[in-house]
């Protein structure tokens, strides 16, 4: 009995102890967005579970962990006039009305799944999401719409292909009743369009077989200019509001398209490996001199009113470029939010430790955690199950990967 009480006391002491994060810092990011009314305020969703939300109120200089989501977000949208109201598309839809302190699940029609979300800037109670609608047998690319901030919803199936999926939404900045939706609809790169606020939708055939549409952009300078970022077909451009399309660039895996505030003829595209820029509303493109470390941004956004700032969230953390994509300093060198499932300590030198960021990388310290160094990538599946060390040499390490 004395042992039980002693153990309970020890555990209570551990629970009450003060803990300080010692790194590694950063981690994978899957979504991010800035407030249109207060550009200092931004929200980011790390790609980890449980999923905290990162928030900054000083344009990225400092970050705080602010509430949590049920799952990591694929997309985020901030209310046009209230920086404390944010929607997060996490398969399900979540919303905060107090700046991220609390997040609530927004009830949607049964079988709904959401990947992207947009808010009508003139009527913020109206919100659109896309993903799929499960009709009892198949998952069909669909759009969900609410006009009362999520109290009730209407769902429209846009496709007839079984197991199709919506990935992107774009609203015409000059007319919020016009929206474009893209996603997976077989091998043909297909965009859908509504001109009556989602009551009816038209299928727009691009003429290319590039599979997924990951990103869409409707120009604020000319609503007839629409861009689509695809998996295989590169960047497609229409100058007649989607009626016809041409290939503006052959870059693969374009996940985001954003226009520079104050000069919307300048558009940036985030691809799997590089960032690209157009200075003529998407007619011609060039590769930027640099890219955010980690490649393949899960999030890419600009800040309203700040024409020099580009933000990217990758598997290494959050980065900002103020020189047109040439350099990308890190904004999360002192923020710990990635999931660390495995830690290994060398028996011959306890100051040497290895750990794995889930679905990310392996890090090493030789001074007990004061400094961490990212090891060269060698993972295939992304997860380490355990570390083993040579009894006499801390530099000889075995890592057991999940796939063997």
Image (cartoon, rainbow, N blue to C red):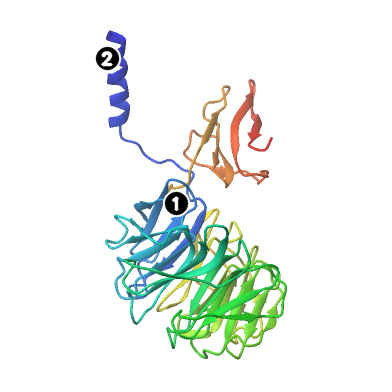
The residue that disc 1 covers is 71
Quarter where residue 277 is shown: bottom right
| Residue 305 percent across, percent down from the top left | 40, 79
User: Is residue 7 in sight in this rendering?
Assistant: yes
Of labels 1 and 2, the one closer to you: 1
Q: Residue at (43%, 87%) from the top-left corner? A: 175
The residue most toward the front is 136
Residue 308 vs residue 133, the one in the foreground: 133
Per the image, the residue denoted by label 2 is: 5
Q: Quadrant of the N terminus?
A: top left
Disc 2 secondary structure class? helix
Residue 71 picture location, percent across and down = 44, 51
For residue 346, above or below residue 225: above
Q: The C terminus appears in which quarter of the rendering? A: top right
The residues tagged by marks 1 and 2 sit, at their Cα atoms, a distance apart of: 38 Å
Residue 184 x/y as whole percent: 62, 67
Answer with left or right where residue 217 lies relative to residue 230.
left
Where 272 falls versus 385 (above or below)? below
Q: Is residue 212 left or right of residue 81?
A: right
Give whichever of 37, 233 is nearer the camera.
Answer: 233
Q: Quadrant of residue 285?
A: bottom right
Q: Residue at 67% of width from left, 38% of height from top?
A: 403
Left or right position of 312 against 245: left
Could you say which quadrant of the image residue 120 lies in?
bottom left
**Which sits earlier in the primary sequence, circle 1 or circle 2?**
2
Q: How many marks?
A: 2
């Amino acid at each position: 009995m004395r042992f039980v009480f002693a153990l309970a006391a020890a555990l209570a002491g551990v629970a009450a102890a003060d803990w300080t994060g010692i790194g590694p810092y950063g981690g994978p990011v899957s979504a991010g967005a800035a407030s249109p009314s207060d550009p200092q305020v931004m929200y980011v969703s790390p790609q980890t579970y449980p999923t905290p939300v990162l928030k900054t109120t000083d344009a990225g200089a400092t970050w705080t962990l602010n509430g949590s989501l049920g799952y990591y977000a694929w997309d985020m949208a901030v209310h046009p006039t209230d920086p404390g109201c944010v929607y997060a598309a996490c398969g399900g839809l979540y919303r905060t009305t107090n700046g991220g302190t609390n997040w609530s699940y927004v009830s949607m029609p049964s079988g709904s799944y959401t990947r992207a979300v947009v808010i009508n800037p003139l009527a913020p109670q109206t919100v659109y999401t896309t993903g799929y609608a499960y009709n009892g047998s198949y998952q069909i690319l669909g759009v969900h719409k609410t006009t009362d901030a999520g109290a009730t919803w209407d769902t429209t199936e846009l496709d007839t292909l079984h197991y199709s999926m919506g990935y992107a939404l774009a609203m015409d900045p000059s007319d919020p009743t016009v929206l474009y939706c893209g996603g997976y609809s077989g091998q043909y790169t297909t965009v859908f369009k509504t001109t009556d606020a989602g009551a009816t939708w038209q299928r727009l055939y691009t003429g290319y077989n590039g599979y997924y549409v990951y990103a869409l952009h409707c120009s604020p300078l000319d609503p007839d200019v629409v861009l689509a970022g695809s998996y295989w077909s590169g960047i497609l451009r229409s100058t007649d509001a989607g009626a016809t399309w041409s290939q503006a660039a052959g870059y693969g895996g374009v996940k985001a398209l954003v226009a520079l505030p104050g000069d919307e003829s300048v558009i940036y595209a985030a691809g799997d490996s590089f960032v690209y820029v157009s200075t003529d509303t998407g007619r011609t493109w060039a590769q930027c001199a640099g890219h955010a470390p980690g490649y393949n941004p899960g999030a890419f956004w600009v800040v309203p009113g700040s024409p020099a700032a580009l933000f990217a969230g990758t598997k290494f953390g959050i980065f900002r470029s103020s020189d047109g994509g040439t350099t990308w300093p890190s904004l999360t060198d002192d923020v710990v939010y990635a999931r660390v499932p495995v830690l290994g300590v060398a028996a011959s030198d306890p100051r040497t430790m290895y750990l794995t960021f889930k679905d990310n990388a392996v890090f090493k310290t030789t001074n007990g955690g004061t400094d961490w160094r990212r090891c060269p990538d060698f993972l295939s599946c992304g997860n380490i199950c355990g570390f083993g060390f040579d009894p006499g040499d801390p530099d000889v390490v075995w890592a057991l990967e999940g796939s063997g």
